[in-house]
Image (spheres, grey):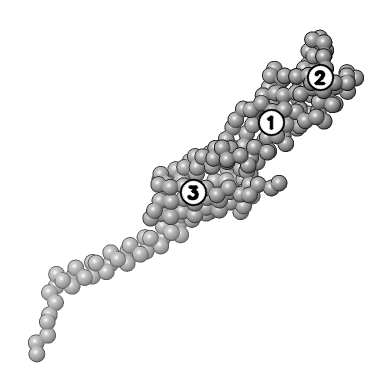
């Protein structure tokens, strides 16, 4: 029985195909080792955050009421016995701590172009009080207008103490659904910026899992 002899052109085509396949494997392997994985890239991205290692996720401005302890200290300065409610507008900045990159998790599905990101528990910075918005309302007592003005002036001078006092009110909002949604949106914007810097392209879907807030 005669053997089938392969033509020279078929043999050459086979050799070229095999060479291209080997070259593709080598190139893919080189690229895989020459470029850091997504996790490593994300870690480096977090480490380069400036001026502080945190992601600013959302900001809001709200009016908060000071605690009874704060108002008691304020009244004691003037030796006034009365019941008052003090409130002020404050800027609240919600952040995600980034000082520990290992507390974050990121997974990139290149085929689906899906980025899944888990963060540490969100937090908020010390409220920035607008002292010109301080309002004082008396309860079951009358305070002279001049005395009321002095109380507002002193409360403004106690801005640092007032900010610390309002911190508890600000932290309580971290569990509000609208605030969590705003924080998630901020993380998604941050993730898009990362994808662009890492040359991953525009993700089709970003899934965010916020860390559990400590009570």
User: Could you give the CA–CA distance between mark 2 and mark 1, rounded to whole angstroms?
Assistant: 30 Å
Q: Is residue 148 above or below residue 48?
A: above
- In this view, the residue farthest toward the front is 140
Q: Position of residue 111 (x, y in %)?
A: 38, 55
**Image side of residue 203 versus residue 190, left or right:** left
Q: Where is residue 132 in the image (x, y as percent from the top left)?
A: 70, 17
Instruction: Please tell me the numbered disc located at residue 127.
Output: 1
Residue placed under numbered mark 2 in the picture: 140
- At a point 61% along the width and 53% down the height, the residue shown is 102
Residue 183 visible, this orientation: no
Residue placed under numbered mark 3 in the picture: 207
- At a point 80% along the width and 14% down the height, the residue shown is 148
Q: What element carries label 3?
A: strand
Closer to us: 96 or 7: 96
User: Could you give the CA–CA distance between mark 2 and mark 3, rounded to whole angstroms?
Assistant: 52 Å
User: Could you give the CA–CA distance between mark 3 and mark 1, rounded to whole angstroms?
Assistant: 29 Å
Q: Is residue 205 above or below residue 148?
A: below
Q: Which of marks 2 and 1 is in front?
A: 2
The crowd level at tag 2 (other Cα within 10 Å; few <14, some 14-19, many 20+) is few
Closer to us: 72 or 193: 72
Q: Earlier in the sequence, mark 2 or mark 1?
A: 1
- At a point 82% along the width and 30% down the height, the residue shown is 69
Closer to us: 13 or 161: 161
Which quadrant: the N terminus? bottom left
Q: Where is residue 56 in the image (x, y as percent from the top left)?
A: 59, 37
Q: Which of marks 3 and 1 is nearer the N terminus?
A: 1
Q: Where is residue 104 in the image (x, y as percent from the top left)?
A: 58, 51
Q: Is mark 1 on a helix, strand or loop?
A: loop
């Amino acid at each position: 029985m005669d053997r089938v002899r392969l033509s020279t052109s078929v043999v050459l085509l086979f050799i070229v195909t095999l060479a291209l396949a080997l070259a593709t494997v080598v190139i893919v392997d080189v690229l895989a080792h020459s470029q850091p994985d997504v996790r490593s890239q994300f870690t480096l991205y977090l480490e380069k955050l400036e001026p502080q290692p945190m992601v600013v996720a959302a900001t809001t401005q709200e009016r908060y009421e000071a605690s009874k302890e704060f108002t008691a200290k304020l009244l004691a300065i003037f030796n006034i016995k009365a019941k008052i409610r003090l409130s002020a507008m404050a800027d609240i900045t919600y952040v995600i701590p980034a000082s520990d990159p290992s507390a974050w998790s990121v997974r990139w599905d290149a085929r689906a172009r899906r980025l899944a990101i888990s963060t540490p528990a969100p937090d908020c910075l010390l409220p920035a009080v607008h002292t010109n918005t301080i309002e004082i309302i008396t309860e079951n007592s009358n305070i002279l207008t001049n005395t009321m003005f002095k109380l507002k002036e002193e409360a403004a001078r106690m801005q640092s103490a007032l900010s610390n006092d309002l911190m508890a009110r600000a932290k309580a909002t971290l569990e509000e659904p609208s605030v969590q949604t705003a924080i998630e949106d901020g993380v998604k914007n941050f993730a898009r910026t990362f994808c662009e810097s890492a040359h991953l392209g525009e993700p089709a879907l970003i899934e965010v899992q916020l860390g559990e807030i400590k009570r």
